[in-house]
Amino acid sequence: MDWNKIWNDVISKIVWLLVGGAGGWIVGLFKGKKESSTAIERKDKIYQPLIDEIKRYSKFDWSVRENIKVHVLREIATESYKFGLPDEVQNKCDDLYSMVSEYNSIDPIKVADSIIVDIFTKGYEEIYGSIIDGISYHSDRDGNEWEEEEIAEPVQMIEHINNTKDIESLLLNEGMYSDEVLIDEENALSVLIYLQLKRIYSSALYVVINGERYKLPEPVIELKVSPEEYMAYRYDFFDIYNNSKKIKRKYELREEIIYCSQALIEELKEIIGKIVRVYEVEEI
């Protein structure tokens, strides 16, 4: 029996096992380090920034007038393939972003402006009997003739005047009346109105065309106040505004966004907690 040969074979196998085991240990070590690095990177670049972004909207101290800005959430929802989030987290992000998009699509300024136009049009017709300011006659080269009703200039103007600043001030100061109108001098009866509305109505009523102020027709009702004051107290702007479908929906979405943000934040915190316990605590 060749003991030298046998001994060499044993030595070779032991060396092979040691090298193989060490190699596997090294591969496992690098794999673990990579997993640790990836998890920590996701925590720092995805989960925590998302929490920081939506935390603002998880509380009840923000106004329904403001637009929601969520750049991280938008990217996660619209480019989900880049992140590979757990399905439950991704679904929550998608739902929240859908709510935010619908919420932002409802512009309180535009809603308010539309209501103001409607109030002015109704008020003008009530005060002056009609919004029609005459008939114009037209014809073309083929001999066709037609009539066209001319809408009063103030009614046309109210749709085109930029009242954004006054409307922003109006919405910001709901319940804080800034002017009053004496509607019954004999009994000293006054009513409070919003100066912003009075200003808006006035700018349309007394529009200047070709250097001359538009001449209003004679009122068909008895007015004890100016037309703009009458419109401001006769029609309750905020009652119409707060009961409009769009504004009600915006308030509903705000509440849904708050609760959805809270749920998503809690889930993200759990994920971050696991990452810290598994990968970061061991490294300290």
Image: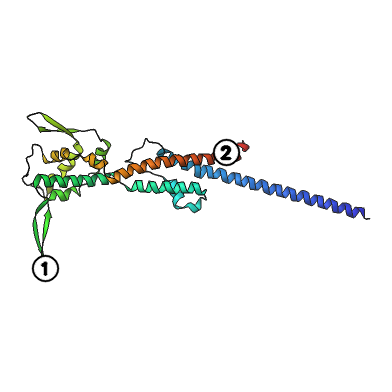
* 180 displayed left or right of 55: left
Residue at x-position 13% and y-position 46%: 124
Residue picked out by circle 1: 144
Mark before the other along the chain sequence, 2 or 1: 1
Q: For the C terminus, which image quadrant?
A: top right
The image quarter containing residue 192 is top left
Q: Circle 2 sits in a helix, a strand or a loop, which is it? A: helix
2 and 1 marks in contact (CB < 8 Å)? no
Query: Label for residue 276?
Result: 2
Q: For the N terminus, which image quadrant?
A: bottom right
- Answer few, some or many: residues within 10 Å of disc 1's Cα (few below 14, many 20 plus, some between 14 and 19): few
- Answer few, some or many: residues within 10 Å of disc 2's Cα (few below 14, many 20 plus, some between 14 and 19): some
| Residue in front for this viewpoint, 129 or 225 | 129
Q: Position of residue 154 (x, y in %)?
A: 14, 48
Residue at x-position 11% and y-position 45%: 126
Q: How is the image coloured?
A: rainbow
Amino acid type, callout 2: Val
| Residue in front for this viewpoint, 240 or 105 | 240
Residue at x-position 59% and y-position 38%: 277
Q: Position of residue 86 (x, y in %)?
A: 52, 48
Q: Position of residue 133 (x, y in %)?
A: 9, 52
- Can the viewer see residue 166 in this picture? no
Amino acid type, callout 1: Asn
| Residue in front for this viewpoint, 212 or 252 | 252
The image quarter containing residue 69 is top left
Q: Circle 1 sits in a helix, a strand or a loop, which is it? A: loop
The image quarter containing residue 179 is top left
* 259 displayed left or right of 22: left
Q: Is residue 101 above or below residue 192?
A: below
- Can the viewer see residue 2 in this picture? yes
